[in-house]
Image (cartoon, rainbow, N blue to C red):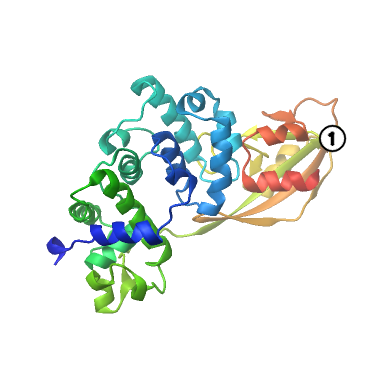
């Protein structure tokens, strides 16, 4: 059955009429703009990305300007989008494109996937949209569409099955008029997954692939895709040292280069309240607990406990870090909950 499937024509035709064609990164074949949108859209909704995308292009209109920026500038502009490793890889990738490729994006997915932060699917999206390369993608939406159409019931937690699905996806690509068909086909699969072939209660009756879809015929599309290995959520409690001096400045340190909020400026973090108390026991200060709050990450629940401390300006800096005026915070890369917390104090 899978060898005779011909879904490309139906996907391309449907996308032209019913797909998303109004987004700013769809009005260009500039690989810089498409790449920027693809990185931002990873695990982030379109409505959130739109504003960040515009601000990034205003600040960094091309790959050369992004490459020459400091990491701090990039992180500050990214602040609020989350998954900050994307921003650091974006910056490193821009630098390599300038240094290694003369400021031009390689036109093949194979070459692009060698660059920081660009996986196989992202590389395929960029070269499909910009260079009409005949390569597949397998983001979450497309993976769901294709496993349902194919009735692909192998466990995608096993790498050999993931490779098999890539091979099957390759066989379904358009074979003619690639200049026009590849961008529409790639976008069409994304749009189908986002609008009709949803995780729950897919709209099979109006799907252009309904007649060819094995999952619909079998009556159980929600069982696809199959992936048995799941990441477990866990909870952590962090105590935040909210240290301010008499001038209203706040004391921040830079997070380590790996882990949660890597590389961002942040209030000093302690995993135990006793640890924070031990640090301040010799200081001539008083401290009080502010209201704790929850910050939810993809696989982590962070219970954050701010502890407010007033520091007199004539005393030496307490720990490694720096003081920042409220106006300076806008130009720093700050984790979203920290930025909200500090704004609430001003």
The answer to whether residue 261 is seen in the rendering is no
Looking at the picture, how far across and down is residue 37, in whole percent?
46, 43
Q: Please, which residue is most extreme toward the bottom here?
A: 219
In the rendered view, does 212 fall on the left or right side of 289?
Answer: left
**Residue drawn at x 30%, y 77% as measured from the top left:** 220
**Residue drawn at x 37%, y 39% as measured from the top left:** 118
Looking at the picture, how far across and down is residue 208, in whole percent?
30, 67
Nearer the observer, 100 or 128: 128
Looking at the picture, how far across and down is residue 23, in whole percent?
48, 49
Residue 227, compared with residue 52, is above or below; it is: below
Looking at the picture, how far across and down is residue 17, in whole percent?
38, 60
Assign the C terminus to one quadrant of the image: top right
Label 1, secondary structure: give it: loop
Assign the N terminus to one quadrant of the image: bottom left
Q: What is the quadrant of residue 96 in the picture? A: top left
**Residue drawn at x 79%, y 37% as measured from the top left:** 244
Q: What is the quadrant of residue 284 in the picture? A: top right
Nearer the observer, 8 or 267: 8
The answer to whether residue 187 is seen in the rendering is yes
In the rendered view, does 62 fall on the left or right side of 97?
Answer: right
Residue 17, compared with residue 325, is above or below; it is: below
Nearer the observer, 335 or 194: 194
Q: What is the quadrant of residue 34 in the picture? A: top left
In the rendered view, does 252 fall on the left or right side of 168?
Answer: right
Disc 1 crowd, CA 10 A, few/some/many (<14, 14-19, 20+) = few
Q: Which residue is mark 1?
A: 284
Please count the marks in the image: 1
Residue 40, compared with residue 299, is above or below; it is: above
């Amino acid at each position: 059955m899978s060898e005779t499937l011909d879904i490309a024509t139906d996907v391309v035709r449907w996308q032209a009429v019913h797909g998303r064609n109004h987004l700013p990164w769809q009005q260009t074949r500039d690989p810089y703009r498409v790449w920027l949108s693809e990185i931002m859209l990873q695990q982030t909704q379109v409505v959130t990305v739109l504003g960040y995308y515009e601000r990034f292009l205003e600040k960094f209109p091309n790959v050369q300007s992004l490459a020459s920026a400091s990491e701090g500038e990039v992180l500050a502009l990214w602040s609020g989008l989350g998954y900050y490793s994307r921003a650091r890889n974006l910056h490193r990738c821009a630098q390599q494109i300038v240094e290694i490729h003369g400021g031009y994006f390689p036109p093949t997915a194979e070459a692009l996937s060698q660059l920081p932060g660009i996986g196989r699917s992202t590389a395929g999206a960029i070269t499909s949209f910009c260079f009409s390369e005949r390569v597949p993608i397998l983001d979450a939406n497309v993976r769901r569409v294709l496993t349902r159409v194919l009735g692909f019931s192998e466990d995608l937690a096993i790498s050999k099955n993931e490779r098999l699905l890539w091979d099957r996806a390759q066989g379904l690509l358009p074979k003619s008029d690639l200049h026009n068909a590849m961008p529409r086909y790639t976008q069409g699969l994304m749009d189908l997954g986002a609008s009709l072939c949803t995780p729950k209660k897919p709209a099979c009756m109006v799907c252009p692939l309904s007649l060819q879809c094995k999952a619909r015929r079998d009556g159980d599309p929600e069982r696809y895709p199959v992936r048995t290995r799941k990441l477990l959520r866990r909870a952590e409690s962090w105590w935040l040292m909210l240290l301010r001096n008499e001038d209203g400045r706040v004391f921040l340190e830079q997070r380590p280069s790996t882990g949660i909020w890597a590389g961002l400026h942040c209030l000093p973090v302690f995993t135990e309240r006793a640890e924070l108390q031990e640090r301040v026991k010799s200081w001539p200060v008083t401290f009080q607990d502010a209201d704790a709050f929850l910050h939810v990450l993809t696989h982590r629940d962070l219970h954050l406990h701010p502890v407010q401390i007033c520091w007199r300006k004539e005393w030496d800096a307490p720990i490694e870090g720096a003081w920042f005026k409220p106006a300076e915070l806008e130009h720093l890369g700050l984790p979203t909950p920290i930025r909200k917390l500090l704004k609430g104090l001003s």
